[in-house]
Image (tube, grey):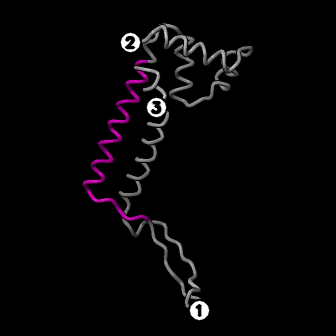
Amino acid sequence: MTHKELKQIIYLKSEIITLSLRMKRSVQKSKDFIGDYGYDYSSGQKNVITISGFPLPDEETRDKINQRVAELKALVVAAEKFISEIPDARIRVILSLRYLEGFTWHDIAKKIYKNMTADAVRKCTMRWFAENKK
């Protein structure tokens, strides 16, 4: 797995969450959606209007969303497997925190190495990728 592919994993995890929430909403019936009301003063009088939930996706759209979620989960699992097979424990921890958990370089430096800077952690990672190109 390349550095470029690993950088996408945190975004793929966010996409999984977004799509899962969309599917959860689509399972509910339209009457179960939380609605709200407001006032329309455009006619000069106070008229109550009802604001309802989201339109429900059709069966084909739900199938595509489920398929996409499965594909994304497979990519995340592949990244986790790639990281777990790295022999250097330090690099494993750094890559897990950075690409699976979304930590910043600064946060990783503070969490693992009390006296190391964020740039040092980043350079260590980039050096590892340069040495282990496939």
Alpha carbon of mark 1 to alpha carbon of mark 2: how far? 70 Å
Magenta segment main secondary structure: helix
Mark 1, other Cα within 10 Å: few <14 / some 14–19 / many ≥20:
few
Q: Secondary structure at mark 3?
A: loop
Across and down, in percent, residue 72 comes to 37, 36
Q: Nearer the viewer, residue 130 or 44?
A: 130
Q: Nearer the viewer, residue 32 or 44?
A: 44
Whether 11 is among the magenta residues is no
Q: Secondary structure at mark 1?
A: loop
Q: Nearer the viewer, residue 18 or 28?
A: 18
Which mark, by number, is residue 134? 2
Which mark, by number, is residue 8? 3
Which residue is denoted by mark 1 in the rendering?
A: 45
Q: Quadrant of residue 48?
A: bottom right
Across and down, in percent, residue 37 comes to 54, 76
Which mark, by number, is residue 88? none
Quarter holding the N terminus is: top left
Across and down, in percent, residue 126 comes to 55, 15
Which of the two discs, 1 and 2, labels the residue nearer the N terminus?
1
The three-letter code of the residue at mark 3 reads Gln
